[in-house]
Amino acid sequence: MRLFVEPMNATVVDIDADGRIKIEHEGWSAPTLQERRAIIYAAKEEISSLDELLTILDKPDKTA
């Protein structure tokens, strides 16, 4: 996983079952409430972008 979180200016690269996150080029840490909210927001935005991408690519090819 790679999720850039703009407010943190960091990329989350892993998460464990306890909710600790691993930031690229850093170690494991428990995110603060503010960091958790920023990560959740970034993840939802990424999901929305990926859904839009899938919708566009799943359309039948009209040029063929």
Image: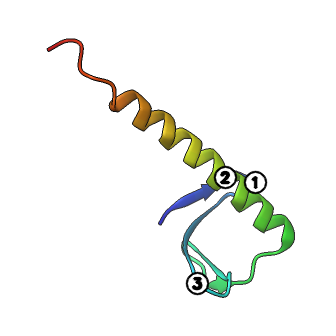
Real-space CA distance between mark 2 and mark 1, rounded to the nearest whole angstrom: 9 Å
Determine contact: label 1, label 3, CB under 8 Å: no
* Vertical arrangement, residue 33 with respect to residue 55, above or below: below
Which tag is nearer the camera, tag 1 or tag 3?
A: 3
Q: Is residue 14 visible?
A: yes
Real-space CA distance between mark 1 and mark 3, rounded to the nearest whole angstrom: 21 Å
Which tag is nearer the camera, tag 2 or tag 1?
A: 2
Determine contact: label 2, label 1, CB under 8 Å: yes
Left or right of 62 on screen, residue 5: right
Mark number displayed over residue 42? 2
Instruction: Report which residue position mark 3 lands on.
Output: 16
**Amino acid type of the residue tagged 1 in the rendering:** Pro
Residues 21 and 54: in front is: 54
Determine contact: label 2, label 3, CB under 8 Å: no
Instruction: Report which residue position mark 1 lands on.
Output: 7
Q: Residue furthest top?
A: 63
* Vertical arrangement, residue 41 with respect to residue 62, above or below: below
Among numbered discs 2 and 1, the one appearing first in the sequence: 1
Among numbered discs 2 and 3, the one appearing first in the sequence: 3
The secondary element bearing badge 1 is classed as helix
Give x and y (percent) for residue 34.
Answer: 85, 65
